Image (tube, rainbow, N blue to C red):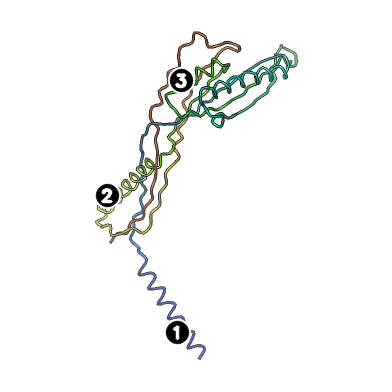
């Protein structure tokens, strides 16, 4: 009786396995696609730096703090919210003099305070840079443009990626004499549009102001929103 029952279970299991194999599509084409949309940026991050030097560390720090506080106050008064002004880095380093045949000697200290300012009105970037420099900033490092709140554009980029994948699948299927009859699986993603920063190097001599300097022209251009898709098509 036990042997007969085991035989029946084995037959049922094998039958189920064959049915699963028959329903699982074996003829598939796997392709990937890419989509790119270019849009005008609406936000920019500008990196500033304040560098001060003194014979002792305390004096260098005090001078730096005075300038940075003045810069932050000026930016706030111009309409930039406090949460859009952030510290990006703070460094205190000794400065050395090197005489031949002698050990390096500390000649003073340098303090470097870096802040990042988020500007949500692209047309104001040049004025923000000028204001920061007049307030005591002596280094402008780079500007990073990006598009904020761009879900609609990301969806367009993903649609282009899907269309790109289908076009590739059609070419492959035609070359193999096959016909696409369905989709087994699909996945896709879009990417945060954070392009490489524009290196904008503007240095002033320590303690120098910006009197007489020309207004800073800035042209943001366009940023790219990218998306990708991977689709497995069923062919007959």
Would you place residue 3 above or below residue 210 in this image? below
Residue 59, horizontal then vertical, whole percent? 71, 16
List the residue tagged with mark 3.
Answer: 126
Looking at this view, name the residue that lies furthest to the top: 212
> Whole-Å distance between the Cαs marked 3 and 1?
82 Å
Would you place residue 212 above or below residue 157 in this image? above
* Quarter of the image that includes the C terminus: bottom left
List the residue tagged with mark 2.
Answer: 171
- Name the one closer to the observer, 93 or 60: 60
The tag earlier along the polypeptide, 3 or 2, is 3
- Going by the image, does 193 lie left or right of 164? right
Q: Quadrant of residue 139?
A: top right
- Going by the image, does 117 lie left or right of 124? right
The tag earlier along the polypeptide, 1 or 2, is 1
Q: Count numbered badges in the picture.
A: 3
| SS of the residue under disc 3 | helix
Q: Nearer the viewer, mark 3 or mark 1?
A: 3
- Name the one closer to the observer, 6 or 33: 33
Q: Residue at x 43, y 21 (%)?
A: 218
Picture disc at residue 8: 1
Residue 114, horizontal then vertical, whole percent? 59, 25
> Whole-Å distance between the Cαs marked 3 and 2?
49 Å
Residue 83, horizontal then vertical, whole percent? 56, 32
Whether residues under marks 3 and 1 lie with C-beta atoms below 8 angstroms apart, the answer is: no
- Name the one closer to the observer, 125 or 113: 125
| SS of the residue under disc 1 | helix
Residue 217, horizontal then vertical, whole percent? 42, 18
């Amino acid at each position: 009786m036990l042997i007969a029952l085991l035989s029946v279970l084995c037959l049922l299991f094998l039958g189920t396995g064959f049915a699963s194999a028959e329903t699982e599509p074996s003829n598939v084409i796997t392709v990937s696609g890419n989509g790119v949309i270019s849009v005008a940026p609406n936000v920019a991050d500008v990196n500033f730096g304040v560098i001060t030097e003194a014979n002792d560390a305390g004096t260098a720090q005090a001078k730096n703090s005075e300038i940075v506080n003045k810069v932050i106050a000026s930016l706030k008064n111009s309409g930039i919210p406090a949460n859009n002004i952030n510290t990006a880095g703070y460094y205190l380093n000794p400065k050395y003099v090197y005489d031949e045949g002698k050990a390096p000697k500390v000649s003073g200290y340098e303090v470097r305070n870096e802040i990042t300012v988020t500007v949500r009105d692209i047309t104001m970037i040049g004025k923000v840079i000028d204001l920061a420099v007049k307030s005591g900033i002596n280094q402008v490092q780079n500007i990073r443009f990006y598009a904020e709140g761009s879900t609609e554009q990301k969806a367009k980029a993903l649609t282009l990626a899907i269309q790109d994948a289908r076009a590739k699948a059609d070419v492959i299927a035609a070359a193999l004499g096959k016909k696409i009859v369905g989709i087994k699986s699909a996945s896709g993603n879009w990417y945060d549009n954070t392009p490489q920063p524009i290196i904008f190097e503007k240095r002033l001599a320590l303690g120098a102001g910006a009197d007489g300097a020309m207004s800073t022209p800035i042209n943001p251009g366009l940023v790219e929103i990218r998306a990708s898709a991977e689709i497995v098509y069923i062919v007959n």
